Amino acid sequence: MLHAMSTTALARRGSDIATRLRAGLLDVLLPQQCIVCGDFGASLHPECLTAFPPAEGSRCARCWRPVPTTWCERCASEGPDVPAFDALRTPFRFEDHARRAILEAKFRGITSHLPVLAGAAVEVIPPEWRYDAVVAVPLARVRERRRGYNQAAILARHIARATGVREHGRLIARVRSTPAQATLSAERRATNLVGAFAVRGVPPPAVLVVDDVTTTGSTLDAVASALKAAGAERVYVLAVARED
Ligand SMILES: [Zn+2]
Ligand SMILES: [Zn+2]
């Protein structure tokens, strides 16, 4: 009923719909052009992923940092600085085409290549990972409303479908809006996120957390901390790219 809703709420709902329509329309109306080869017809050909910078070589078994040893110094310390997640994997380094593909989804409303990126992420899931639910790192509500979608949630949906595990869309919430991470120093990033995530109800024993990109890993550490505090035993993280 219209009179039950304030004018502000109505206006906000109107602009939500407009944002979503704009994001959808960009995908439909712009002729799709591959990020890598420039050919029209798709925003990213699966075969063009071979041009992406692979996150290969020797890496830390937990945080995926490039190191010549099994564990990086931080993860080997067993101290309080060890990330709360059990392991993280990404198919790519956050450079060149991988960087561009992620930024197009983050800031330009182009999302049609996300299923291809999700497919690449699925390929690097270690065979020993067993998880009961897939969850995306949530965006702050205000930011999601402005953007019209959460690119991590789109990735999570495709990863859940491809691996036959249910996606738990409402398990994690951002409890307060945090300043955009990119504007903060590494030190501020860590403190900014303390208590930023809340888990609704009891999580299943093992959870796969999905994000588009990881830089310092502090967001994913905070999500994993929240999940473990709520009772999760194992938390795995899958992202498309890692900033080395
Ligand atoms: Zn191509
Ligand atoms: Zn490590």
Image (tube, rainbow, N blue to C red):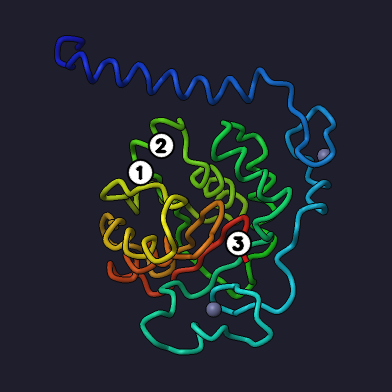
Q: Camera-side residue: 244 or 167?
A: 244
**What's the amino acid at mark 1?**
Ala
Question: How crowded is the residue under tag 3: few (<14 C-alpha within 10 Å), some, or many (20+)?
Answer: some
Label 2 CB, ligand 1: below 8 Å?
Answer: no
Residue 173 percent across, percent down from the top left: 32, 50
Residue appearing at x 67%, y 39% in the figure: 113
Name the side, left or right, on which 201 lies relative to 206. Answer: left
Q: Amino acid at mark 3?
A: Glu
Q: Nearer the viewer, residue 134 or 88?
A: 88
Question: CB atoms at circles 3 and 2 under 8 Å apart?
Answer: no
Regarding mark 2 in the picture, which secondary structure is present there?
helix
Which residue is drawn at the image coordinates 56% and 31% (left, top)? 109
Of badges 3 and 2, nearer the viewer stands 3
Q: Residue at x 53, y 86 (%)?
A: 73
Image vertical order of residue 137 relative to residue 68, above or below: above
Judge the density around disc 1: few (<14), some (14-19), many (≥20) Cα neighbours within 10 Å: some
Q: Which residue is mark 3?
A: 243
- SS class of the residue under badge 1? loop
Of pointers 1 and 3, the one earlier in the residue sequence = 1
Q: Which residue is mark 1?
A: 140
**Does residue 70 appear to the left or right of 153 in the view shown?**
right
Instruction: Classify the position of the C terminus by image quarter.
Output: bottom right
Residue at image mark 2:
144
